[in-house]
Amino acid sequence: MPQFDLAALENVTGRKLSESPAREAFEVQRQASRWTYLGSGMTHTNFLATLGAISPAGRRKVEGVAPAFC
């Protein structure tokens, strides 16, 4: 988890996270960021239609890897 996100979480909760909970929060945040920035974009119908018009093979490739980010 980027330092500012961890600091914000600690500020809101009013407690300092030890190493294990901080690492867990980082993993959850990383997966959420993957979905927000990669998964949602790679599965959006408009993006896939545009990509398919440019490169049908590229669309198939993106559709194949997108689940890893969701």
Image (spheres, rainbow, N blue to C red):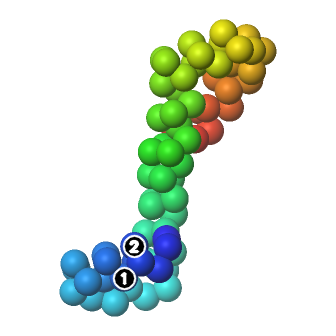
Residue farthest toward the right in the current orientation of the protein: 57
Q: Amino acid at mark 1?
A: Ala
Q: Is residue 60 visible?
A: no
* Residue shown at the point (31%, 77%) measured from the top left: 8
Residue 13 sits above or below residue 45 on the image: below
Decide: few, some or many residues near mark 1? Use Cα within 10 Å; few <14, some 14-19, many ≥20.
some
Left or right: 40, with 61 as reference point: left
Res. 54 image quadrant: top right
In space, the residues marked 2 and 1 are separated at their CA atoms by 5 Å
Residue type marked 2: Asp
* Residue 61 drawn above or below residue 22: above
Tag 1 residue: 7
Q: Looking at the picture, how far across and down is residue 42, in whole percent?
A: 57, 31
Residue 69: image tag: none
2 or 46, which lies in front?
46
In this figure, which residue is indicated by the disc labeled 2? 5
Left or right of 58? Residue 36 is: left
In this view, the residue in front, 49 or 11, is 49
Residue at left offset 51%, top offset 59%: 30
Q: Is residue 49 left or right of residue 18?
A: right
Kindly state the secondary structure of the residue where label 1 is placed: helix
Residue at the location (27% across, 88% down)? Answer: 15
Q: The residue tagged with tag 2: helix, strand or loop? A: helix
Residue at 22% x, 78% y: name it: 12
Q: Is residue 65 above or below residue 20?
A: above
In front here: 26 or 2? 2
Residue 58 x/y as whole percent: 74, 21
Q: Are marks 2 and 1 in contact (CB under 8 Å)?
A: yes
